[in-house]
Amino acid sequence: MMAFSLGYRCLVWYSVPYRYRRTIQSMGIRQIKSSVAVVWVLAAIVIGLIAGVTSPGGLVALAALGLLPPLALLLLWNDPSQSMSESIQQGRR
């Protein structure tokens, strides 16, 4: 399974024109960030249900614990910076 997915990525990677490769990489990073955020929020909800949180203070704390870390992750985790070769290629256009 892993060899197939690696082979597929390589096939796609080298068949795409150079100027679109950065877009493909950033799409992967965005998907990872979104997936981590969704898993975190779902885990916080499950923990809250298992713990039986019913008090208003507990619900506020659970909401803060469930939403603030993914929000910080989405806002503060930057895409990779442009490489030297990408800068040169962009300057040549």
Image: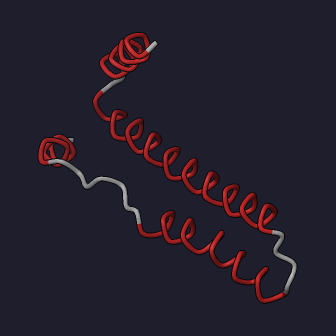
Say which quarter of the image contains residue 54.
Answer: bottom right
Q: Nearer the viewer, residue 50 or 68?
A: 50
At horizontal 54% and vertical 52% (from top left) the residue drawn is 36
Question: Where residue 11 appears, x then y in whole percent?
Answer: 36, 13
At horizontal 41% and vertical 14% (from top left) the residue drawn is 8
Q: Nearer the viewer, residue 48 or 75?
A: 48
Above or below, 26 relative to 20: below
Question: Where residue 37 appears, x then y in whole percent?
Answer: 58, 57
Residue sitting at the far front:
51
Above or below, 7 relative to 51: above
At horizontal 61% and vertical 58% (from top left) the residue drawn is 40
Q: In the image, 1: left or right of 35?
A: left
Colouring style: secondary structure
At horizontal 42% and vertical 69% (from top left) the residue drawn is 76
Q: Nearer the viewer, residue 3 or 45?
A: 45
Question: Where residue 72 appears, x then y in whole percent?
Answer: 50, 71
Total numbered labels = 0
Q: In the image, 84: left or right of 7?
A: left
Q: Nearer the viewer, residue 89 or 4?
A: 4
Q: In the image, 93: left or right of 6?
A: left
Question: Where residue 70 appears, x then y in whole percent?
Answer: 56, 65
* Image quadrant containing the C terminus: top left
Residue sitting at the far bottom:
57
